[in-house]
Amino acid sequence: MQKARRLAEVKDLLASPEFSAWWQSLSVARQALRELTEQYDELLTQAMLMDFRAELAQKNAIDTLYRSGEHEDAAAGLLAESTELENQSFKSVGDFEELRFRASETWYKLGAAERQLEEQKEQLQQAQQQREKLQGSARREADARHSQREHELKLAERAFRQLQQEYERDNTRKTRVWDEVERIWARSAEMSLTMAEKKMQAKKVRREAETGFAQAEERKQRAQKLRAEAEAKGSSREQANQRLTEVLTQAREQFSCAIGDEFLYFRERDQSQRAFAVGLVADSQTFNIEVKPLAVYHVDRNRGVSFLEPAVEQPPSVEEGDRRFEAYFLQGRKGEKKPAAAG
């Protein structure tokens, strides 16, 4: 049952060894709860952060694995293209060999035609020289032979020019086909080299993905461990909160007061609508005045701590003075007997 007190009695109580011991217990319980709460929040935050990092590592590993597949697909595409180019090169090399054979044959024919042309020129020159020395019928026969040699020379020149044009045409086609062969070979070599690099990149990226999956799994395990530690710390926090509740409850029983989270309340003697509130916290923001630990405030029953006034000694009322005066003369000083009535 709450005991009504005067302000002086409340202050005496606050200064007593019993209250000091209780206040120390309250401070220890609050500090323990505060530390455990901070540790619990920190562990829970770390666990949530580790969960997020695990999910991020998992996502990155999956994306990396997709990139590995892209490299493998690119390597397969390059292999197919390189194989197609090799097949093209076989046909082009065959075309080149055919043209080379034809050009070589034409070259031999051209050489023979050139020799024949030179012979025709020499024979024409000889016929010209012989014709100049002859007269009469012999001259006519020489003129006929000369005309024949001129005709044969023109035919030889025409055949030589045709073979020369044919050779140039075949040689140009041969050179063009060979350039195409070399282009195909160069492109095929580039495809092969790039394909090999893509394969190695696929292996490298796949290894990165495996590392990412392992990292994600490690972070998941660390998150589970942190969460388990947070749960254990949460249990300790609940125990600390229970301990704080017990300490506050002890005040109700030990000091005959009402308890709150931040104040103790004592009924004020001779003031049924008022009470004393003893601050248990420091707070300069919440209430109408600054609250300090163990400071005593006046409150009324209706408004409570929504309006605080510093507690000060109240002068005794006239009725209180009359009662004290009567008690003094009717009962005597404390420790003395009342005088006997005259008889």
Image: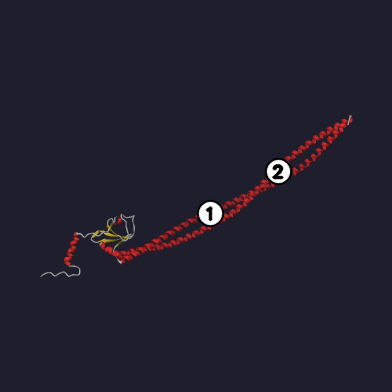
Find disc 1 in the rendering and name its residue. Answer: 62
Local SS, label 2 = helix
Residue 27 makes an appearance in the image: yes
Residues 164 and 126: in front is: 126
Q: Please state which amino acid type lies under the numbered disc 2.
A: Thr
Q: Please state which amino acid type lies under the numbered disc 1.
A: Ile
Percent position of residue 185, x then y: 67, 48
Percent position of residue 134, x then y: 88, 31
Q: In the drawing, does residue 237 fall left or right of residue 15?
A: right
Find disc 2 in the rendering and name its residue. Answer: 175
**What residue is drawn where x is 19% and y is 61%?**
321
Instruction: Pick the quarter of the image with the N terminus.
Output: bottom left
Disc 1 and disc 2: Cα gap in Å? 52 Å
Percent position of residue 178, x then y: 70, 45
The answer to which quarter of the image holds residue 340 is bottom left
In the rendered image, the vertical position of residue 112 relative to residue 189, given as above or below: above
Q: In the drawing, does residue 112 fall left or right of residue 224?
A: right
**What residue is drawn where x is 46% and y is 56%?**
49
Residue 4 makes an appearance in the image: no
Q: Nearer the viewer, mark 1 or mark 2?
A: 2
Local SS, label 1 = helix
Instruction: Pick the quarter of the image with the C terminus.
Output: bottom left
Percent position of residue 307, x then y: 29, 55
